[in-house]
Amino acid sequence: MKTKYDVIIVGAGPAGSTSALKIAAKGYDVLLVDKDSFPRTKSCGDGLTRTATKILYDLGLKEELSIFKRTENTRITVKGKGSRNFKYPDHMTDPNYGLVIPRKELDYLLVKKAIEKGVFFMGDVLFDSLIYINQKAAGIRLKNGNTFYADIVIGADGATSNVAYQASLPITPIDKMGIGTRGYFKIAETDDTLQMFLPILDRSNKRVLPSYGWVFPVEKNIVNIGVGLIEQNEIYDIDTIFNMFMNTLKKKDSRFSNLQLQGTLMSGPMRFDFKPERTYAPGILLVGDAAGMINPFTGEGIGYALETGIHAANFYLELKKDPNEDFNDLSKYGDLLGSKYQGYFEAGTESINRYHLIWKVLKGTFQNDKPLFNAIRQATVFPEGVNESFFNYYTENVSDQISEHRGHIRSDMLSVGQGLIQMTREDWPFLSRLFNAGQITPGIPFRPSLLILIAGYSTQTNRNELTQLGMAVELGLAAAICHDSVSEEKNDDTTSSGNWGNMIAILVGDYLLSRSFEIISFYDQSYTKIISEGISKSNQGMILLKNKIQNKETISINDFLELYYLKNKYTFELCLQLGSMAKKSTKKETLILKEFGKHFGTAYFIVEDTLNYLKNKNTVSKTELNSISLGNHEMRLIEVLLKDQKGTPKEKERLSVNICQETAINEIKLAKKHLKNIEDIFVKTTLGNLCDLILEKNETITL
Amino acid sequence: MSKASSDWLLCNISKARLASINAIMEEIIDASDTNFKKLALHTARMGGKKLRPSLYLLALNTGDYYGKELLTPAAALELIHVASLHHDDVMDRADLRRNATSVNAEWGNLNATYSGNYLFSKAISILSQYDTTVNQITCGYISDLCLGQLKEAENAYNLKLSYEDHIDVLIKKTASLFELPCKLGALLSGASDDILEAITNYSKHMGIAFQLIDDLLDLKGNPHKTGKTVGTDLIEGVYTYATLYTLHETDHANKLTHLLTLDDMKPIHIQEAIELISLSGGLNAAKVKAKEHLEIAKNALSILPDNNTKTSLLNLTHFILARDH
């Protein structure tokens, strides 16, 4: 029997098989061992996300998978809060759906595919221990005494990973792990919807158990029903929770009243203790469940198993290119997983309280469409559908408008985003998810921080300082989004005594704002002065404008603009001022840019708001994922005008839109007047281009 | 030994300076719109203990420099405190503040949120005009303050919260706004490094003790004096030192757990829970802990010269322990 391989993989679940076949496909020798022979069944929800489906298709399994149930909808139901449907955004390329595949079939298909690619598979053998040479894992010993050697050992052996244990990696004790139970049931008719129910409450309805239940359609008449519990506790075992869940289903939906269990219920441990630094050791990589890769809010794990399987394979293949590589220091693998997944998952026991908090917020704000809560909801229960959510504005790609410094600007904008993610990750990893979501624009996004770079570049400026200024401003803007999400309601809703929505909006907003000031305090204190004055003015502007609107006073365009300038001071105007200061421009030049920014920003927001209004006026369904993110929409010019116009609704709308368009054109005119006095050619041209972009957009507005 | 709000402050010069900070706060706020000014200053005009400005003014006496420009930070520090009250009242859904209508009750949650931001950033703006060190220290403590509040929320209903994590939250969310004034006062008046360290240490432990006592008042205070319903923390899942003591170290843990996890905690349950906490020695344990920190605070001051600044700071430790609202 062959005893030397390039890679040994312990565990032939989705993560292990995927790694194996990717590595074997490049011509390397792979040994894949598993304690079972295949096919075999597993406790799992069997639901595959769109990403998981895409990976399987890319592995060449599209045809084999065509017989399985496709799911296009995910319906999330929160106790006492109703349901919402989540769909993959239309712009996602094929496949635009997920699949439900029983693990018995999926795992068998993948193992067969691996064997086809040349992987040597041994089923029904038990892994015993690692063999070390020079303090590095260099092979494995099976219970039957056989030994095998390789460059690395990949631990794909699930939540109770023996490879991780043998490698002395800190692992969560089994009683602290999560647990899941599922069964297959016969039902009259299934649909194409994945149904999730969360969270399950304890009997007192007071404490949110970090748990969820699911009903996934497997075949025409078969559903997979199960529950998952993130944290086991003294009061409730998984069976009790499963029964509680089944009772709820039966009460709710007559289809479930006469369910017949097919086979037996099956339970399995789940770990939610992902930590980048415990996903590798000398000669060892962990993938899938063994690495703690499960979404704690929905229990989704197959997609992450496939992804980490591929990451580990690619990581090995890259190292293997160097003939002198000794596979001792594999820390880069941990870094890779860290940058990709932290924020989705985070470190075990100490993070459980954060999950509790997010659960409470999720529950309390389930039907709340303010931007912060849209973002939290998507990041937790439907991460793949994240598109715009946190930032309503600033998503346009303006690469074409920038002629010089393009490379610098692109990389500095990326640094701003990366910096935000890194910073928030340390204190509150969940927040970095929200920032991640805002990083999807390709090219150069039209964000306020971009204007810092445009106004700030010169041969002398410190680009790092510009990036930090950009981060500070972006943090302030994110804080404003949180604070705008505060509602006037005292409770999250009439049935709840909770106030989690307002609490989290304020706490997170304050935290982001304070971080913004902290970053900037390491630079010249004049920056702090400018930024703090900007924030105080824009908050003052919001109070004044809001109260004027509330008092139902008729507001002239000029009065509106005066308050609107004040309210928007913190965005483009402030950024141009900061950039200009960082460049050490003359006071006169900075002042001109400031004046420019005032009118430019106003035009930008009026155009965006009018477009958004027209785009969303017909979106009435609050249950659709892509419904509008409501911020402070009553402060938009279009809304203010609509209230004042006379005539039929159609006439009112036409008149109001016209006034908005005219006002935007006028503001750009004023902005351009100031632009004439700018000396720096790059600044002048680029800002001129951006003005024209706004004008173009303004012209596209049609009823 | 119950004393009136500022009886502990024996230093006359600080008293005189303290008297002028109301006027400075008024000046800081933009006056172009009377309604706005009324809203922004609503809470500040109610008065209050002004502990943070007092600490700052006393700390100013530890160095040998004083200039009129050093009075403004006292007002800024009070504004930071007031800003945090605007936000706290939205989160706590408080209709009353110092026995008058709170900003959120009168103008709404959003206005309270925005006005808090306004006051806070105005204060930062003022404190940024001294030097970079002052600016950095200010922003560092503010950041701790916000992180501490976030951590506290994370731990709501956490029956297993450790003392260590609890005290860490107190250091961040409360002690930071005691340390900041003392540090700034010492720094701006040019106090020596030893003094700076001593007074920072003093204020940190004072802050911890202050919050420990404050949390005790939630469990046994007189609602007419505190303006708050007894036991609010228990309903909202904020388990403070006394509660944690009963949960972690006594035979009453199970009974208390049962009460705390009740679906709908009625006043009678709250009363029962408080009796349990008291009976099992929780209230006493918290008071002992507070005394411990006050001792550390007092000892930290030993290197200060004997004068009425030091006496005032020492007095404050007694005042904190004895306060009933």
Image (tube, helix red, strand yellow):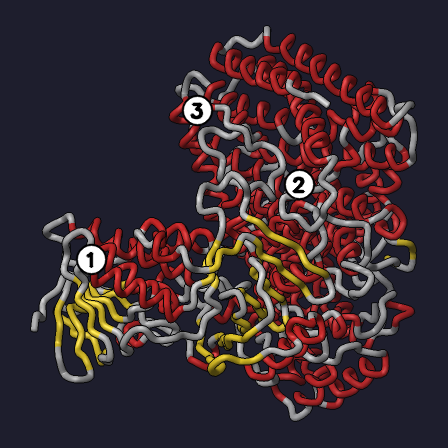
Are discs 1 and 3 located on one and the same chain?
Answer: yes
**Residue at left 26%, top 60%?**
A113
Q: Position of residue A277 (x, y in %)?
A: 35, 62
Name the one closer to the observer, A687 or B100: A687
Which chain does the residue under circle 1 lie in?
Answer: A
Which chain does the residue under circle 2 lie in?
Answer: B
SS category of the residue bearing label 3 = loop
**Residue at the disc numbered 3:** A461
Cα–Cα gap, marks 3 and 2 = 26 Å
**Residue at the disc numbered 1:** A117
Quadrant for the C terminus of chain B, please.
Answer: bottom right
Residue A65 visible at all: yes
State which mark lies toward you, 3 or 2.
Answer: 3
Earlier sequence position, callout 1 versus callout 3: 1
1 and 3 marks in contact (CB < 8 Å): no
Q: Position of residue A382 (x, y in %)?
A: 55, 54
Residue B238 visible at all: no
Which chain does the residue under circle 3 lie in?
Answer: A
